[in-house]
Amino acid sequence: MDTTHPQVLPEGSPLVRFSGVTKCYGPLTVLDKLDLDIAQNEMVSIIGPSGSGKTTVLRVLMTLEKINDGVIYVDGEPLTHMPKAGGLTFATEKYLHERRSKIGMVFQQFNLFPHMTALQNCVEAPMQVLGLSREDAEERALNLLELVGMGDKKDQHPTRLSGGQQQRVAIARALAMRPKVMLLDEVTSALDPEVIGEVLNVIRSLNSEHNLTMIMVTHQMGFAREISDRVCFFYEGKIAEQGSPEQLFGDPQNERTKQFLHAVLDAN
Amino acid sequence: MEWRWEFAWEILPRMLWATGNTLLAAGVGYTIAVVLGLLLMLGQRTPYRLINMPVRELVEFVRSTPLLVQLFFVFFVAPQFGIKLSAWTAGMLTIGLHFGTYLSEVYRGALEGVPKSQWEACRALNFTTGYTYRRVILPQAFPIALPGMGNYLVGIFKDTPLLATIGVAELMHTANALGAETYRYLEPYTMVGFIFLIISLPTALGLRRLEAAVARAQGNTRH
Ligand SMILES: Nc1ncnc2c1ncn2[C@@H]1O[C@H](COP(=O)(O)OP(=O)(O)OP(=O)(O)O)[C@@H](O)[C@H]1O
Ligand SMILES: [Mg+2]
C-alpha cells in the first residue's frame, strides 16, 4: 500500500507523469526514482548511452514491465496502481486492460503479426479491443495506411515488405487504437539507411499535422534536434539533463551530456 | 519357398480387413495422443507446482521407457491390480499416452518458437490473453508444430504392429495368424511390409505438402 502518492492528479496536470519511478532487475537499478512529466501534444525525445534505461522508460509506461516503486499517472489517473482504501495498490490485470489502450507503442523490430496482411494487422485491435465493426475498423485502418503511404500494400504480408514499409505499417497499427500517447523505441535502428527517411517523414507529419503526444527514444541526434519540443538525456536510470533541443544540443550544462554528445557527434 | 500369387490373392481380403484395423488403431491412438499431448503441455505450463511437477515427472517417465514395456504393463500387469482392460482399450490408451508425451514436447517447442516480441505486440495493443493465444500465438505455433505432429502420425502408424503382442487383430497379428494356419510366411509378411509402405509414403508426402501450404497461406515464405 502506497499512501505517499495521490489517488488522482489535480485538474490541468500533464498527460503522463512518472512520479519517483524505480525499476530494478534483481540487484540492478535501471530506473532510479525517475520523475518525468509529458504534456499534451508534447514531443519528447530521450537520448543517452546504451543501458541508461531509455527503453525501460517506454516499457514500464506500456505496462510491459512492472515497476518496483513510484507511480505512473496517465490522464490524471494512476496507471501502474489503482486506488484502494486511502492509498494506492498495484494495478490488477483487469484495471490495466481498461487503461492500456491510451498508450501505443512502436518497436525497434516492428513486431508485426507475420500471418496477417498489413490491413489485418491494423484491424484486429480496434475490432477486438475497442469493439469497432469490421467496416469501421477497415475504414480507419485504410486511412492510416494511406497516411503512412502504405495504402497500396494493404494486402501484403509483412515478409513481403521492406523494413521501412513494415515499420510504417507498425506505426499505422499503433495509431489505429487512437492512443493518447505514442511511444517510439529506436524505430529506425533496425532499418537500412536508405529507408530511414521514409519513416522519419511519417513521424514528422504525425508531429506537425496531427499534433500527437510522443515519446521517442532515438540515436538520431539530428532528427531529435529538429522535431522535439524537449530532449531528455538519460544517464544511469535518471534524467541527467533536459531542455529544449537548442539548449541541450547547443549549450549542454552537464559533463555527462557533453561527453555523450561529443562521442556521438564524433562518431558520425 | 517361392512366391505364390494365388495364395496372396486368397489372403488379401483378410489382410485388407486387418489393414482397416491398423488404420483404426493408428487413428484412434493419434487422436488420443493429440488431445492428451495438449493437456500434458498445459499441465506442464501451469504455474501451480502441485500440478506441473507431477505432470513433468509423468512425461519424463513415459518418454524414457519403451512402448512395448508399457503395453505389457497395462495389459498384463495392471489386471493384477484390478484394472482390466480389453486389448483394444489398453492398446489405444497406452499408445495415446506414449505419443501424447512426445506431442506435448512438440507443442511446447512450437509455443516457445513464437518470439516473445509477438506477446509484447499483443500486450501493447491491449489484447486479452485468450485472444492473444487464439489469433496470434497459436496460428504461428501451428506451422512450427506441424512437422513434428506429422512425424508422430507416421510414427504411431508404424508402431501399431506392437499391438499384435497383446492380441489386437491388426495387420501383424493377422499375418502371424495366417502363418501359423498355413505355414506360409513369405506372402503375409511381404504384404504387411508393402501395405505399410504404400500408406506411409503418400502420407509423408501429403504431410510435407500440407506444411508447405500452411506456410504459404500464412505468408511466411518469400517467392
Ligand atoms: N529483462 C531484463 N532482465 C535483466 N536486465 C535487463 C532486462 N532488460 C533490460 N535490462 C538491463 O537494464 C538496463 C537498461 O536497459 P534499457 O534497455 O532500458 O537500456 P537502453 O537505454 O534502452 O539501452 P540501448 O541504447 O542499448 O537500447 C541495461 O543494463 C539492461 O541490460
Ligand atoms: Mg533501448
Image (tube, rainbow, N blue to C red):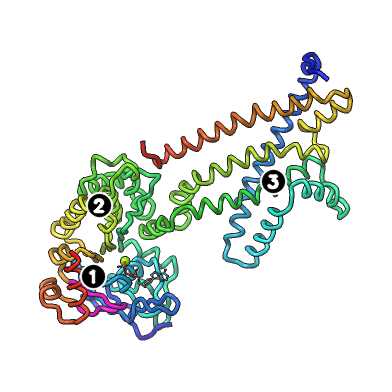
Specify the amino acid type for callout 2: Asp
Q: Which chain carries label 3?
A: B
Question: Are labels 1 and 3 assigned to the same chain?
Answer: no
Q: Nearer the viewer, residue A67 or B111?
A: B111
Residue A94, percent from left and from top: 43, 65
| Residue depth check, mark 2 versus mark 1: number of the one nearer the observer | 2
The residues tagged by marks 2 and 3 sit, at their Cα atoms, a distance apart of 50 Å
Left or right: B111 in relation to B219: right
Specify the amino acid type for callout 3: Gly
Image: magenta residue range? A231-241
Q: Which mark is residue A47?
A: 1
Let me know if residue A233 is in the magenta part. Answer: yes
Residue A107, percent from left and from top: 32, 59
Instruction: Describe the element under mark 3 as helix, strand or loop.
Output: helix
Q: Name the residue under label 2.
A: A192
Q: Is residue A229 above or below residue A27?
A: above
Q: Which of B54 and A49 is in front in this view?
A: A49
Neighbour tally class for label 3: few under 14, some 14-19, many 20 plus, Cα within 10 Å? many
Q: Mark 3 points at which residue?
A: B96
Residue at 33% across / 56% down in the picture? A109
Left or right: A177 in relation to B137: left
Q: In this view, does B6 lie above or below A131?
A: above
Q: Which mark is residue B127?
A: none
Residue at 30% across / 70% down in the picture? A50
Q: Which image quadrant shows ligand 2? A: bottom left
Q: Quadrant of residue B207?
A: top right
Q: Do the residues labelled 1 and 3 touch (CB within 8 Å)?
A: no
Q: Look at the image and tell me whether residue B158 can be seen.
A: yes
Instruction: Describe the element under mark 1 as helix, strand or loop.
Output: strand
Mark 2 Cβ inside 8 Å of ligand 1: no
Residue A237, percent from left and from top: 31, 77
Left or right: B26 in relation to B215: right
